[in-house]
Protein backbone atom coordinates (compact mmCIF):
# COMPACT_ATOMS: atom_id res chain seq x y z
CA UNK A 1 0.00 0.00 0.00
CA UNK A 2 1.38 3.38 -0.98
CA UNK A 3 0.66 6.46 1.11
CA UNK A 4 1.07 9.85 -0.53
CA UNK A 5 2.58 12.30 1.97
CA UNK A 6 3.93 15.09 -0.30
CA UNK A 7 7.21 15.24 1.62
CA UNK A 8 9.71 17.65 0.11
CA UNK A 9 13.45 18.06 0.58
CA UNK A 10 14.27 20.87 2.97
CA UNK A 11 11.21 20.44 5.18
CA UNK A 12 11.75 20.39 8.90
CA UNK A 13 11.53 17.07 10.71
CA UNK A 14 8.41 18.20 12.57
CA UNK A 15 6.66 19.00 9.28
CA UNK A 16 7.59 15.57 7.90
CA UNK A 17 6.26 13.80 10.98
CA UNK A 18 3.06 15.87 10.86
CA UNK A 19 2.44 14.98 7.20
CA UNK A 20 2.98 11.28 7.87
CA UNK A 21 0.71 11.43 10.94
CA UNK A 22 -1.98 13.10 8.81
CA UNK A 23 -1.62 10.47 6.07
CA UNK A 24 -2.10 7.72 8.68
CA UNK A 25 -5.01 9.59 10.34
CA UNK A 26 -3.07 9.84 13.59
CA UNK A 27 -3.94 13.53 13.82
CA UNK A 28 -7.62 12.56 14.03
CA UNK A 29 -6.83 10.17 16.87
CA UNK A 30 -5.03 13.00 18.68
CA UNK A 31 -8.11 15.21 18.32
CA UNK A 32 -10.29 12.45 19.77
CA UNK A 33 -7.83 12.08 22.66
CA UNK A 34 -8.11 15.80 23.35
CA UNK A 35 -11.90 15.58 23.33
CA UNK A 36 -12.06 12.60 25.68
CA UNK A 37 -9.31 13.59 28.11
CA UNK A 38 -9.73 17.36 27.99
CA UNK A 39 -5.94 17.66 27.75
CA UNK A 40 -4.03 18.99 24.74
CA UNK A 41 -2.02 16.37 22.86
CA UNK A 42 0.95 18.70 22.37
CA UNK A 43 1.29 17.95 18.66
CA UNK A 44 1.93 21.54 17.54
CA UNK A 45 4.56 22.17 20.21
CA UNK A 46 6.27 18.86 19.42
CA UNK A 47 6.23 19.76 15.70
CA UNK A 48 7.83 23.15 16.42
CA UNK A 49 10.49 21.56 18.65
CA UNK A 50 11.37 18.97 15.99
CA UNK A 51 11.58 21.69 13.32
CA UNK A 52 14.00 23.66 15.51
CA UNK A 53 16.10 20.56 16.24
CA UNK A 54 16.26 19.37 12.60
CA UNK A 55 15.28 22.27 10.32
CA UNK A 56 16.04 20.62 6.97
CA UNK A 57 15.53 16.94 6.25
CA UNK A 58 17.37 15.77 3.13
CA UNK A 59 15.24 13.41 1.06
CA UNK A 60 16.94 11.28 -1.55
Image (cartoon, rainbow, N blue to C red):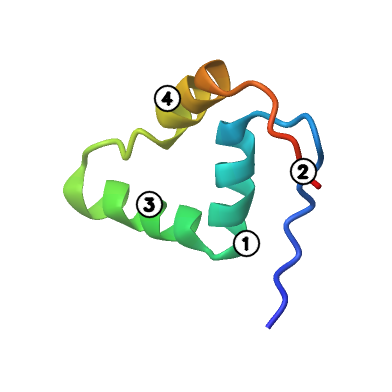
Which label was assigned to residue 45?
Answer: 4
**C-alpha span from label 2 to label 1:** 18 Å
Residue under label 1, please give it. Answer: 23
4 to the left or right of 30: right
Per the image, the residue denoted by label 2 is 59
Residue at disc 1, secondary structure:
helix
Among numbered discs 2 and 1, the one appearing first in the sequence: 1
> Of tags 2 and 1, which is closer to the observer?
2
Judged from this view, the residue extending furthest toward the left is 37
User: Going from the N terminus, do you reach mark 2 or mark 4 first?
Assistant: 4
Q: Residue at x 48, y 53 (%)?
A: 27
Do the numbered discs 2 and 4 sit on residues whose CB atoms are within 8 Å?
A: no
Which quadrant would residue 1 be assigned to in this image?
A: bottom right
Q: Nearer the viewer, mark 2 or mark 4?
A: 2
CA distance separating discs 2 and 4: 24 Å
Between 4 and 35, the residue placed more toward the observer is 4
Residue 12's image quarter?
top right
Amino acid sequence: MKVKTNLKAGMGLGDCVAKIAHALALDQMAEKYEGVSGKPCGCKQRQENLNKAVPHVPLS
